[in-house]
Image: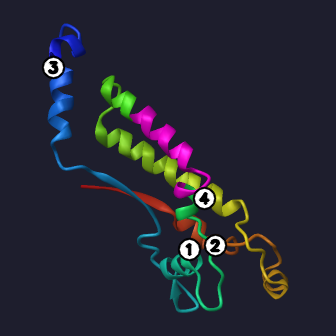
Amino acid sequence: MTKELGGGDDSRWKAILAAVGKPRRKVRVGVFDDGGLENGVSIAEIAAFHEFGTSTIPERSFLRSTFYGHGADGLKAMCAKLVAAIIAGKMDETQALGLLGTWAAAEVKKTIRSNIAPALAPETIARKGSSVALVDTGQLINAITFAVED
């Protein structure tokens, strides 16, 4: 059966079948080690406040909305391209996951730049001089990264 599916040389097919049984690696995207504080609050905490909202800050999901909302089709398409490249032997799993992480972090940054609703309060706009939510000092958007993990 493997010769039929893999052509004349079934070594790639056997490698794919062997890989399916191995523990899966994953890509995490978000703010991991921001290395700094803004007014005594870490960038990771600020990210969580905006992602989920607080009693005084409305929810402005930039992570979940990127992958479960408007970007879900893009994520599926990217994964399909990467799986096809792995099967074709054009890249290995580590390369594919690195590309997926790079793409995903860029998509999150695009979401942040899209000015996520709800609109900022007039006093917030006056204080920061801009009506774009989640973009002020650039620390949050610059802290978005990815990690490939076992």
For label 4, the residue is 109
Q: Amino acid at mark 4?
A: Lys
Q: Secondary structure at mark 2?
A: loop
The residue sitting at 43% across, 58% down in the picture is 146
Quadrant where the C terminus lies? bottom left
Task: State the separation of the CA atoms marked 4 and 1.
Answer: 13 Å
Do the residues under discs 2 and 4 have CB atoms within 8 angstroms?
no
Q: Callout 3 environment at 10 Å: few (<14), some (14 to 19), or many (20+)?
A: few
Q: Nearer the viewer, mark 3 or mark 2?
A: 2
Task: State the separation of the CA atoms marked 3 and 2.
Answer: 48 Å
Taking the image as shown, residue 49 lies to the left or right of residue 116, namely left
Q: Nearer the viewer, mark 4 or mark 3?
A: 3
Task: State the separation of the CA atoms marked 2 and 1.
Answer: 5 Å
Percent of width and height locating residue 18:
14, 34
Indicate the quadrant where residue 15 lies.
Answer: top left
For label 3, the residue is 11
Q: Amino acid at mark 3?
A: Ser
Report the number of discs.
4
Taking the image as shown, residue 63 lies to the left or right of residue 19, namely right
The residue sitting at 55% across, 78% down in the picture is 52
Percent of width and height locating residue 72:
54, 49
Magenta segment: 67-82
Task: State the separation of the CA atoms marked 4 and 3.
Answer: 40 Å
Q: Nearer the viewer, mark 4 or mark 1?
A: 1
Q: Amino acid at mark 1?
A: Glu
Indicate which disc, 3 or 2, sits on the residue closer to the N terminus: 3
Q: Amino acid at mark 2?
A: Arg
Q: Residue 36 magenta-drawn?
A: no
Percent of width and height locating residue 67:
52, 55
For label 1, the residue is 51
